[in-house]
Amino acid sequence: MQVYHSSYMEIFEIDLSRSQSNKDFGIGFYVTKFRNHAENWATNIARRYHKEPFVTEFTFYERAFEEDRYKVLRFYDYSEEWLDFVILNRDPAFTTNQHDYDLIEGPIADDKVQNRISDFLDAIITKKDFLNELKYHENTHQICFCTINALQLLKKTDTKYSSYVVRITETIIENLIINLDIDEEKAADIFYTSKTFSLLSDKSTELYKKTWQEIYNALKNELNLNC
């Protein structure tokens, strides 16, 4: 998965000691899978510091969500559990993390949501009504890397290499759709969860230097696909 960090500078080395407290999921390094959102946030951040916006791209090996060695918390949508967790982490009484998770994924409490959280805490709106409002909020996404251990899962992306991977991926997914007569979501799921894609995402394997046909054949051999 390609993920993006918003700032007013390019990130070459991640230093958790510079992370702010009282954010949605606590102290950590935050990224999103939505580049357009990252670009908008970078613009806002840069304006605040009178700098130029910059979005740094990373590759994240999302299979880590399923590995036992990482303590993971995932919120798949706005929910009461998500709201309670965000309120806990945003409490100014705490300056350290109130959890021991390595990775946390979920929606974002943007400015609009934060304002309504304040209304909820001030008893202007009930929790039930607030949660009902959140059902209609636009789709947002963030991953917080809370520990040094978790940061090992991020690798700064070589943009030239990344463009190769994107083109190869798009071509292979298109061929899966046609040859297996499936929709795009199913085709993407097949490829993104394959070992072939993991190897393609690892620059050191140099798999990206092969033709898309060779990579596609490797995928077919891996999954015993007759197409």
Image (cartoon, helix red, strand yellow):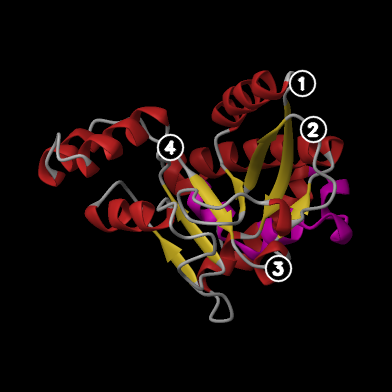
Disc sitting over residue 9 in the figure: 2
State whether residue 162 is above or below residue 98. Answer: above
Left or right of 124 in this view: 155: right
On whether residue 115 falls in the magenta region, the answer is: no
Image position, residue 103 (x, y; %): 54, 64
Kind of residue sitting beneath label 4: Thr
Badges 3 and 4: C-beta atoms under 8 Å apart? no
Q: Secondary structure at mark 3?
A: helix
Q: Secondary structure at mark 1?
A: loop
Corner quadrant of residue 85: bottom left
Badges 1 and 2: C-beta atoms under 8 Å apart? yes
Disc sitting over residue 148 in the figure: 3
Q: Earlier in the sequence, mark 4 or mark 1?
A: 1
| Residue occupying image coordinates x 72% and y 47% | 58
> Spatial distance from mark 4 to mark 1, Cα to Cα?
25 Å
Q: Is residue 218 visible?
A: no
> Spatial distance from mark 3 to mark 2, Cα to Cα?
21 Å
Image position, residue 57 (x, y; %): 73, 40
Comparing labels 4 and 2, the label whose residue is closer to the camera:
2
> Spatial distance from mark 4 to mark 2, Cα to Cα?
23 Å
| Residue occupying image coordinates x 59% and y 63% | 146
